[in-house]
Structures are given as structure tokens and as C-alpha cells.
Amino acid sequence: MSPLSKKAQPAPVSQLLAPKHWPTWLGIGLLQLVVRLPYRVQLVIGRATGWLFRHINPYRRNVVRTNLTLCFPELGADERLQLEKACYSSLGCSLIETATGLWGAPRLFEKYGFISGLEHLESAAQKGKGVILFSGHFCSVDFAGRVLLQHYPVSYTYQEVRNPVFNRLIPRLRGKYIDNIIHRHNTRGFIKALRAGEVIWYAPDQDQSRKNSVFAPFFGIPTNTLTATTKLAKLTGAAVLPLTVERLPNARGYSLSIQPALENFPGDNEVADATRTNALIESQARKHPEQYLWLHRRFKTRPRGEPKLYPQKPRRVRRAKRKQRKAAP
């Protein structure tokens, strides 16, 4: 496993056993029990969990509503409300799917995973220059990842989260079935893996900063888009293959589709490349909008001079108020 950044180094176990972390450990225990239940029951619990998420976090609910309003202006208010509810239902299911990806038995991924296009992956990998499986942040990627690993070894990227228990637990659990986990900031790790001919699953559709990004349209909106896909492909000669993930209706499982390698990619223009890759993600998000991760502030960074689209996070508002009180005479 590739080393994580200093920021992402896990906390000592002694710290993670402190009482403030007990609710997290309790939740982990419950998830381990849920993944042992029948698949249809898991989905019911997931939908109920999504309903709860929607009601306990008004800030994120506003983020979802803002995103849906921006991306689907053609929908009426009632239609967007129904889509919002469906998004949270899907989000709740994704929590269970992530747990299944961590603790589920291999037979689950064989039974409920359906994959097509492996021949495209095998053909690209045979060239020995590495492969980037390009995808977006859709709700079922953790389950889908285990399905793919049943057929082909793939390296994954990792991003630390705020919860230190998860930061310690998740990489170790994934390390049991993934040979190479690369931290998202470990550019050398990406390059080394691709030059060694490895296959990397990469989802760059998150707004991280202006650095190494360009503005390209996503749902017709100028969107801060990482240029890492273009740069990695240029540096290594890796092929870029679009990968789509879909949760099938009626509890039938999950479909993964690997497309042929993008032709004439990367090009000479990073904005054109970003426009092209954004269009691929948008196409899948329009096909199954409830399965895309609308919880993320995808349009957080705006072009110079444009107003912000999201309200401040509550903790930042509280911090600003505390500063005002301290500064008051």
C-alpha cells in the first residue's frame, strides 16, 4: 500500500478508544450486522437511513437542492422535490453498499455484480502503459469496486475524512483486497503505478481548489475541474477508459460498463479535455440523476467575479460570530 500523507496518518488506537468515538464504533458494529442481512432488507434499511440523513442535516439538504436547481432547471418544484428524496434514498443505500464493500462475502459480488467491457480493459492493459478507469462519484462505487476486483486487479485512490476512526479503519480493510491504495495527493504514486502498467480507478469530479484545475462546462455551468486526468495520461501514456456504475431496479444488483479507450485523449487543450470528461459524467448523471452524489458542493469555486452559489457552512458562521463577539468592546 502506498504511504498516506502526514495529514492522513491514522491516529493511535489508544486515542480512538476514547468515549467521544464510541458512537462511531457502535455505528460500525451495526453496519457489520446489517451486511449480514438479505440484500433486499439492506436496501430497505438504506432508504430509511437516507430519509434520516435528509432530515437531520439541513445544510447538506440545501446543497442538494441548490445543485438540483442549477442542473435541472427544466423540472418543476414538485419534480425536483421527488428527485431530492430519491437522491437521499440512494445515498442511504450507498452507506450500506460501502459497508458491504468492506465486509461483504465474495459471493455477494458474484451474485449481484454484472460487468461488461472487460475486453476493453484487457486490451488497454496489454499495452503496458497503465490504464485510468475514469468515473464519477456515483453512490454505488464501493460495491462496484469489489465487483470489478473479482475480475481484475485495480489500484484505488484514497482521501482522508474528518472521522479519525474511519481514517484508520477503511484503508486497512480495503488493503485486504486491494494491492495498491494511493492517496489523492500522491502524484508520484499515480505516475509510478501507471508506468508499472497498473490499472487505477479515478474519479476527479470534485471541487478541490483552483490549483491544477480549469473551468469547463458541467450541466451548462462553468465548473472547476481537475486537470489530473489529462496530465497523468500525458506523463505516462496511460489509456483513459470511461467506466459507468448503475444500481439496477428491483434489487437486481449492480451494472458496471467499461467503455473503449478515449481516442485522441489527451489533446492539446486542457479545457477541451475537461469539457469532454465532464460530458461523460453528465451523461451518466442525467441517465440516473438520483444515483449521483449531489451532496458535494460541485460548484463551490466560481470564476473570478461570480457570486458564491452555496451558503457558508454552519461551523464557519459560528466561528465568525465568535470572532465578532470577541472583537466587540
Image (cartoon, helix red, strand yellow):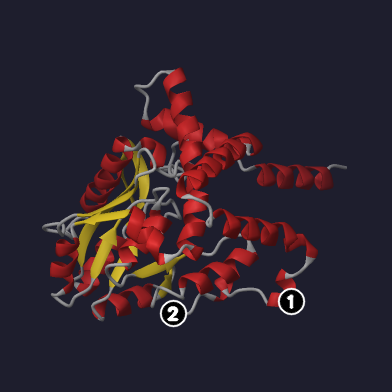
Give the camera-side residue of 296 and 172: 172
- Name which quarter of the figure residue 237 lies in: bottom left
Give the camera-side residue of 209 and 116: 116
**For the residue labelled by badge 1, is the local secondary structure a helix, a strand or a loop?**
helix
Disc 1 target residue: 14
Q: Within 10 Å of the Cα at label 2, are there few (<14), some (14-19), or many (20+) other Cα atoms? A: some
Q: Within 10 Å of the Cα at label 1, are there few (<14), some (14-19), or many (20+) other Cα atoms? A: few
Disc 2 target residue: 1
Q: Position of residue 319 (x, y in %)?
A: 72, 47
Q: Is residue 165 left or right of residue 206?
A: right
Q: Position of residue 15 (x, y in %)?
A: 73, 72
The amino acid beneath tag 2 is Met
Q: Where is residue 17 in the image (x, y as percent from the top left)?
A: 74, 70
One can see residue 308 in this view: no
Give the camera-side residue of 81 and 37: 37
Is residue 69 placed above or below 231 in the rendered structure? above
Question: On the rendered image, what quadrant is the C terminus found in?
Answer: top right
Marks 2 and 1, the one that precedes in the sequence: 2
